[in-house]
Image (spheres, rainbow, N blue to C red):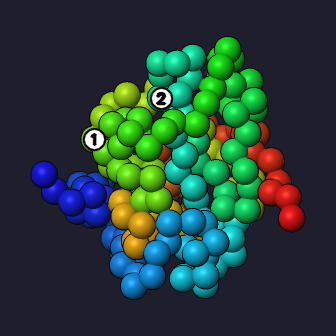
Amino acid sequence: MAKSIDRVREFFRANSLDIEIHELPDSTRTAQLAADAVGCELGQIVKSLVFVLDERDTVLALVAGDRRADPFKIARALRASTVRIANANEVRTRTGFAIGGVAPIAHTSDEIVARLFDESLLRFDTVWAAAGTPHSVFPIERATLMRLTDARVADIASAMEG
């Protein structure tokens, strides 16, 4: 099986996108580490977070690095009874990526039933996302990312404290 980063590269090729993946010597596992590594604002980092809706369906929440995903807001946006963050095994099974390197695209499963785009990301023209590993990221125009993921803009996050 191809490495996770290769799936992301192939996705870009298949969609005729000239997007450079930056492979970095240091970890970009957290939004702060990624922002520090590429020299952008924390909010420009897109966290690709996986949630489980009503204990069966998969939801991908694309959240700004300076925000915290809010399960209650996600549940409200999707009119769901319950929403919880997926565990590490669920994330890998449902996306093909490990936590810390989940890309917003190129998933190995079609289990994702909904994609939500944190409205606070609308502040930025260019954002950065994980490219399949905890050491790789790519810059992308926000509008292009929204088109590729077909994510719906919603109020799904809260400001991080302290």
Residue 144, horizontal then vertical, whole percent:
49, 56
Give the crowd class for mark 1: few <14, some 14-19, many >=20 residues within 10 Å. some
Q: Is residue 1 left or right of residue 89?
A: left
Residue 135 appears in the rendering: yes
Q: Is residue 148 visible?
A: no
Q: Horizontal and vertical percent for residue 66?
A: 73, 62
Q: Which residue is mark 1?
A: 108
The quadrant holding residue 135 is bottom left
* Placement of 9 over or under 21, stated as above or below: above
In the image: residue 120, left or right of residue 21: right
Residue placed at 40% from the left, 82% from the top? 24
Q: In the rendered view of the protein, which quadrant contains the C terminus?
A: bottom right
Q: 109 or 13, which is in the foreground? A: 109
Q: Quadrant of residue 117?
A: top right
Q: Can you tell which mark lies on residue 58? A: 2
Using residue 26 as the reference point, say whether residue 120 is left or right of it: right
Residue that protrudes farthest toward the right in the picture? 162
Q: Are marks 2 and 1 in contact (CB under 8 Å)?
A: no
Mark 2, Cα crowd under 10 Å, few <14 / some 14-19 / many 20+, is many
Disc 1, SS: loop
